[in-house]
Image: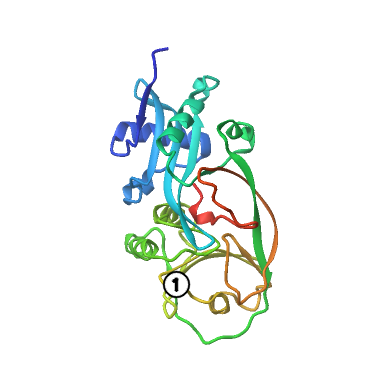
Amino acid sequence: MQELSFVKNYKENFSLRTSFNQLAASTFGIQFETWYQHGFWTEKYQPYSFVDNGKVVANVSVNLLTLVINNEEKQAVQIGTVMTHPDYRNQGLARKLMDRVLENFSQVDLIYLFANETVLDFYPKFGFTPVSEVQFSMDYSHIPSEQSKVRKLDGSKPDDLAFVYSLAAERISGSKYFGTKGSEELLMFYCLMVFNQDLYFLEEEKCLVIFQRENTVLHLYDLISKEKVGLNTILHKIADESITKIVFHYHPDDNEVKLDKQPYQSNLFVKNMTGVTLPREFKHPNTSQA
């Protein structure tokens, strides 16, 4: 086998991007072409790959974003799309790519990732430490409120996507305790590929809400607005009398409600580069997870 070539940040190379998508589809069942074609694959997402004869055979991707931790902004790299073609495994390719990433981004505050169950012993070799998360929830009893204009958006329509992107680009962090900023491109991946029929804009509050209903449970994934909106205000307008429980897939910091919490297994690994003090209990927002 000939020596492999190293390439990175090649999103405008059609052949390599196509090969990258093929490997992602066969490994994880996902593809990034729709995301790219809508213009949401920016310089914040950088694949680091080995290529053999024009074919991407191993990859570690870098996501650049800002974490808001205890009301302070920290520069972070989230690693994702770690994959190796089956014919090229057990050659140390992922290790070599990880070494390049860590060398290139040694100046950030935090580098972190969400690991697959099969490789939990891999990342501690690079100085990553497992960190536990919690999931917040609350019992809910519906309180009637003034009717708010709720506009359902369609994640398959370019105009709606452009509206969501413009709002997300100027959003405040979903939490002052643990949230993200500058991650609107990651959010748009979810709006395109996961929650394209779960996007609701509350016109009076000027807030985009991403949620799903599961019987009597409402799963709240994100609140996206330019200014703080009270959580109770939102809940009264999206949860009807059938809802008895709210599950939060981010870290709510609203003191209007009484929150319950339970351990949440996410296989989060963190390499703390500058000694950042993490909250004792927190939840990384799902819509910013690579």
Residue at position x 32%, y 63% in the image: 159
Q: Secondary structure at mark 1?
A: strand
**Colour mode of the rendering:** rainbow
Q: Is residue 32 above or below residue 91?
A: below
Displayed quadrant of residue 113 = top right
Residue at position x 52%, y 64% in the image: 176
User: Where is residue 59 shown, x and y percent of the image?
Assistant: 45, 32
Q: Is residue 126 above or below residue 165?
A: above
Drawn side of residue 138 relative to residue 193, left or right: right
Displayed quadrant of residue 137 = bottom right
Drawn side of residue 154 relative to residue 121, left or right: left
Drawn side of residue 43 relative to residue 257, left or right: left
Q: Residue furthest bottom?
A: 146
Q: Which residue is mark 1?
A: 207
Residue at position x 29%, y 35% in the image: 14
User: Where is residue 139 shown, x and y percent of the image?
Assistant: 69, 72
Q: Is residue 256 above or below residue 77?
A: below
User: Where is residue 174 shown, x and y percent of the image?
Assistant: 50, 64
Displayed quadrant of residue 52 = top left
| Residue type marked 1 | Cys
Number of marks present in the image shown: 1
Q: Residue furthest front?
A: 275
Q: Quadrant of the N terminus?
A: top left
For the residue pair 244 and 277, the one nearer the viewer reads as 277
- Local packing at callout 1 (Cα closer than 10 Å; few below 14, some 14-19, many 20+) is many
Drawn side of residue 77 relative to residue 248, left or right: left
For the residue pair 219 and 77, the one nearer the viewer reads as 77
Q: Is residue 47 above or below residue 140?
A: above
User: Where is residue 117 shown, x and y percent of the image?
Assistant: 64, 38
For the residue pair 3 and 196, the one nearer the viewer reads as 3
